[in-house]
Structure formats: C-alpha cells, structure tokens
Image: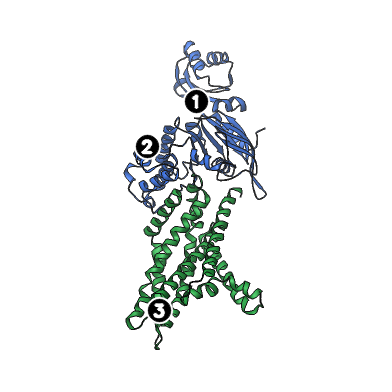
Chain colours: A green, B blue
C-alpha cells in the first residue's frame, strides 16, 4: 500500500508539472463547452432534462477519448523512455505499479470530468434539473473513464510505444462498442450477450438518464478488475521475454 | 555472492547469452567486457532480475532470481545504459522517491541524501529539474538513485557511455570511490575503463564468456603479456647480454635512439620491469627511461573478439 501511495503521488506530480495533461484537459473542457452551447442548448427551445441528456451524450464520448489519450502515459511511455527500469529493479510488486499508475490517472481524469460541472450548472440559470440526475450522469462519466483507462492500462502493457498504446486502447474500446451494433442484428440470447459488452451504449445510458443500477456498476467493476489483472500478468510475463 | 549457473537466454530464436557460468564474490568489482551485442546488457539484466533465463539459474546471496526477485531487488542498485530518471522532477525529489521505493523511511532518506548528493557531485544541481541537466549530470543522478539505499550489489551498464573526457574521468573516480562499499558489476566495451576500475574481468563474445580473471591472470593465460620500452645508454651487445639473463623476457628488439641512446622494446609473460631495471643499472648501462607501453589486455581482447578463444 505504501508503494501504491508513493507511485500515485509521483504520477500526480508528473501530471501537474508537465503540460501534456493540462493540454488534454483544456482541449476536452473547451470541446465540451462548445458542444454544450451548440448541441445541448442549441438554437431551439429545449426542456432542461433534454439539454442535460444531450450534454451527457457528448461528454461520454469525450471522456472515452480523453481516457484513451491518457493511456499512453500509463506503462508504454515509461518503457519507451526507460524509466520503467527504476520500478522493476526496486522491491515493488507489479500489481502495485499497475494500481498506482491507474489510480493517479483516474484521479486526474476525475478532476477534469468534475471541472465541467459548471456546464450542467448553467441549466439552472433558465431551467431546472434534478441534482440526482446530474450526480448519476457524472458517476457514469467517471466509470466510463475508469473502464477505458483500465483497458488503456492493458493496451499500454502490450507495447513500448505510447502512440500504439492509444491506438490499441481505441481498438479495444471500439470492439466493445461494436458488440452493441452486433446485438442489433443478432437474435436472443446472443443479442443480450453482445449488448452486455458495450460500456457506452449499454451501461452508460442508464446513468445518463439518471438511473444507477447495480448491474451497470458490476459491469464497470468487472471490466476494471479484469483489465488491471491482465495488465499485472503482462508485466510479470515480461521477465520471460 | 552471485552464482550464475549455466545460464542461457533466448530472444525468440536468438541466443543473447549462452551457457554463462561464473561466480562473483562479495566486495568484488567485476567488469563485463565485450563488443556491442556481446551479451553484456542481457547478462546484467538477468542479474538485476529484469529478465529470467531461458535455462540455468541465477542466485544472489542464496536467493533464486526466478522465485524471489522481490528480495533480491532490495539488495541491488541498477543503472541501465539510459539513466531511469524523470525529467519533470527535481534531483532531490527524485532521489527521495527512489529511496522510498527501496523501502527507506522518510527519516532514513533525509539522513542519507546529503552524503549521496555530495559523493555523486550533484550539490550544485540538487534543486534543479532533471530535464534541464546535461547528459553527464543525468548519469550522476542515475548513479545516485542506484546507491541511495546503500545496496549490497551495484550494477552499472555502460556508465561512461556518451560522457565527454572530463566527465569520464570524474565518473571513473566516482566508481573507484564506490569500491569497497558495494559489490560492483559494470559493463563496457572500453578497455581502459575496465583496467582502471575493476578487480576482475569477464570477457564476453557472441553470448559466451571467452575469458575471465584478473588482468594479470588473463595475460599469463592467453599470452598477451606485457610490453615494455626502455631507453638506455651504452653498448648494444652488452645490453642484449644483460637482458638475455632475464628468463621471463620473450622478445627483445633493440633500435638506435636519439643522441647515441638505445631504444629497446621488450615483451614478457609477466611484469618484469623491476628485474629489467635492476639488471640494466647493475651493468652500468645508463638507464634513461623504462615504461609499460601497451596493455596485454588489449591484445587479448582483440584476439578473443576475433574468435581466437578456445
């Protein structure tokens, strides 16, 4: 646990001291603000709930993309510049490295997600939505980011090239969402099975509508657990390469 | 301290090292010498528990590298060919982080830091960002992170690579200062580095150990010998007669020097400089200079690297 805390502190410090994290955060927030104004609010009169739903629809996508880009900083960048050697020649377990790096990037992403809270808050200027709906939507955003980051951690454990890690994360994320498209043309029970794999289309949508369901929480927890477990196994296996 | 028992490491179908078998005792400073691609880095990475052998066994202080890497890592400090430093961190903060990663408490790190910073010559840049440092200073930070927890075993992979001549001299001195405090393994393809810093040499070529021992042991075993050049005044025949009485000399070449002097090139299986000096002075031949001119190690290295080892 001591090592996890040490790694989290160092990684968060690195995010804070280098421009790349802030640049990604700024672009994400700027994009969300523009989309909120142009797409969610729009030119035509809309119900407050619809504005929130449209904003969360886009924010889900931007959170996935942001988490994909952050995945290059997880393990691949360390290996690319050679700093992984410090960790792997220290008495630190592979699982501690994975969890430490994951928690730090998750904390940073959560901060960026929460920084956009002023946008749904603007709805209260001329309308009204439930606080619970906003909280549910933001919990969904954080879980969507957390699961994409975990998948990114696994992708990052497969390669030494940060850019390739981003592409792999995008590939894995797209594959999971493609299951939902597959479900549209499949018959039961395959339809239900395929639909279950899609984080955005199947499991984020209830959060977006203000519903927090145990089944969705279990799904995101499962993805995160297995992706981090697979990343740890990959790191351990690298001694054999 | 270290036992490498018939270790082979394959990358795919390529054997990076093959049937390595050696021991390293506590407190030794051992140099791994070989051309690029000889297997030096793979060997050091196997010892640092970064890699596992395809076959064979590595133990450090009786701990098996495959089964107990975590315990071995507590004992070692490692400087790879590229220093593992975070450019966005300040030197002092980075060393704190490296110390704590090696199970040091905050109090232990704070107590140890001044000595580490002083011994690695980082005092002037201790509060600078690592990213703003020159390659030489980054290399020093790399050494500092490797010794911050006072490891029993220090592994340095090409520690002088990319350094300018002044930095090389400083780095060499730093490594010499570390001798006695740690068991040191270092790799290089630069002969003078090994000669000036190590007690024992392991020569690697194409993944095999082609020779191992002290410089003198290698010289006597592989006949590289020692070359000596002396300048004397006197009669050539008398000089040849005197030198002929020294049995260890295997080759004597006399040529006329400046102002009536004689320039003599000698080759011997061992260091006979003292005997030669005594004999020449006793014969009243006017010894003007006597020096070792070429290293036997160089000859051995070239020979073994060309595949002359048995």
The answer to whether residue A140 shows anywhere in this view is yes
Q: Within 10 angstroms of label 3, few (less than 14), some, or many (20 or more) residues?
A: many
In percent of width and height, residue B171 lies at 42, 38
Marks 2 and 1 on same chain: yes
Q: Which mark is residue B292?
A: 1
Looking at the image, is A217 positioned above or below residue B233? below
Marks 1 and 3 on same chain: no
Describe the element under mark 3 as helix, strand or loop: helix
Q: Which mark is residue A36?
A: 3
- Work out how far the residue at label 1 is from the one at label 3, CA to CA, in angstroms: 81 Å
Looking at the image, is B300 positioned above or below residue A102? above
Quadrant of res A23: bottom left
Left or right of residue B72: residue B94: left
Looking at the image, is B2 positioned above or below residue B51? above
Q: Which residue is mark 2?
A: B119
Q: Within 10 angstroms of label 1, few (less than 14), some, or many (20 or more) residues?
A: some
In percent of width and height, residue B86 lies at 42, 51
Marks 2 and 3 on same chain: no
Describe the element under mark 1 as helix, strand or loop: strand
At horizontal 43% and vertical 83% (from top left) the residue drawn is: A50
- 1 and 3 marks in contact (CB < 8 Å): no
Query: Closest to the observer: B214 or A40?
Result: A40
In percent of width and height, residue A108 lies at 41, 62
Query: Closest to the observer: A173 or B44?
Result: A173
């Amino acid at each position: 646990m001591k090592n996890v805390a040490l790694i989290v502190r160092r990684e968060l410090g690195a995010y804070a001291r280098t421009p790349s994290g802030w640049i990604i955060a700024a672009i994400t927030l700027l994009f969300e603000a523009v989309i909120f104004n142009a797409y969610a609010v729009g030119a035509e009169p809309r119900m407050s709930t619809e504005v929130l739903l449209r904003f969360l629809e886009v924010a889900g996508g931007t959170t996935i993309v942001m988490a994909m880009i952050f995945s290059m900083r997880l393990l691949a960048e360390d290996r690319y510049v050679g700093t992984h050697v410090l960790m792997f020649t220290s008495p630190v377990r592979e699982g501690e490295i994975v969890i430490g790096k994951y928690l730090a990037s998750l904390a940073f992403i959560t901060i960026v997600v929460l920084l956009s809270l002023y946008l749904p808050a603007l709805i209260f200027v001329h309308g009204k939505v439930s606080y619970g709906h906003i909280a549910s939507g933001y919990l969904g955003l954080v879980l969507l980011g957390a699961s994409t980051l975990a998948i990114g951690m696994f992708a990052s454990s497969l390669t030494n090239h940060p850019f390739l890690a981003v592409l792999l994360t995008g590939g894995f994320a797209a594959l999971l969402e493609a299951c939902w498209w597959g479900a549209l043309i499949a018959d039961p029970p395959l339809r239900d099975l395929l639909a279950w794999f899609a984080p955005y289309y199947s499991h984020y949508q209830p959060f977006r509508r203000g519903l927090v369901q145990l089944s969705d929480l279990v799904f995101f927890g499962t993805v995160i657990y297995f992706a981090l477990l697979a990343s740890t196994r990959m790191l351990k296996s690298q001694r054999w390469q | 301290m270290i036992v490498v028992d018939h270790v082979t490491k394959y990358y795919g179908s390529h054997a990076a090292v093959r049937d390595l078998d050696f021991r390293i005792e506590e407190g030794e400073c051992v140099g791994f010498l070989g051309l690029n691609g000889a297997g030096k880095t793979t060997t050091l990475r196997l010892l640092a528990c970064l890699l596992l052998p395809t076959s064979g066994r590595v133990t450090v202080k009786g701990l098996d590298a495959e089964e107990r890497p975590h315990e071995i890592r507590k004992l070692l400090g490692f400087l790879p060919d590229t220093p593992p430093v975070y450019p966005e961190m300040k030197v002092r903060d980075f060393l704190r982080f490296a110390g704590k990663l090696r199970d040091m408490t905050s109090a232990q790190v704070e107590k140890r830091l001044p000595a580490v910073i002083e011994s690695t010559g980082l005092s002037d840049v201790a509060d600078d960002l690592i990213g703003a440092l020159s390659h030489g200073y980054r290399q020093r930070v790399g050494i500092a992170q490797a010794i911050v927890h006072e490891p029993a075993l220090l592994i340095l992979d090409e520690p002088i690579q990319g350094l300018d001549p002044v930095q090389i001299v400083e780095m060499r001195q730093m490594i010499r200062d570390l001798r006695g405090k740690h068991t040191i393994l270092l790799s290089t393809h630069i002969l003078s580095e090994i000669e000036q810093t190590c007690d024992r040499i392991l020569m690697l070529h194409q993944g095999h150990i082609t020779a191992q021992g002290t410089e003198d042991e290698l010289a006597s075993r592989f006949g590289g010998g020692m070359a000596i050049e002396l300048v004397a005044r006197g009669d050539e025949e008398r000089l040849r007669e005197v030198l002929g009485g020294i049995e260890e000399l295997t080759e004597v070449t006399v040529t006329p020097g400046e102002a009536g002097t004689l320039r003599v090139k000698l080759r011997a299986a061992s260091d006979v400089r003292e005997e030669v000096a005594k004999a020449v002075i006793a014969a009243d031949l006017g010894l003007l200079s006597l020096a070792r001119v070429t290293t036997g190690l160089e000859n051995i290295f070239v020979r073994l690297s060309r595949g002359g080892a048995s």
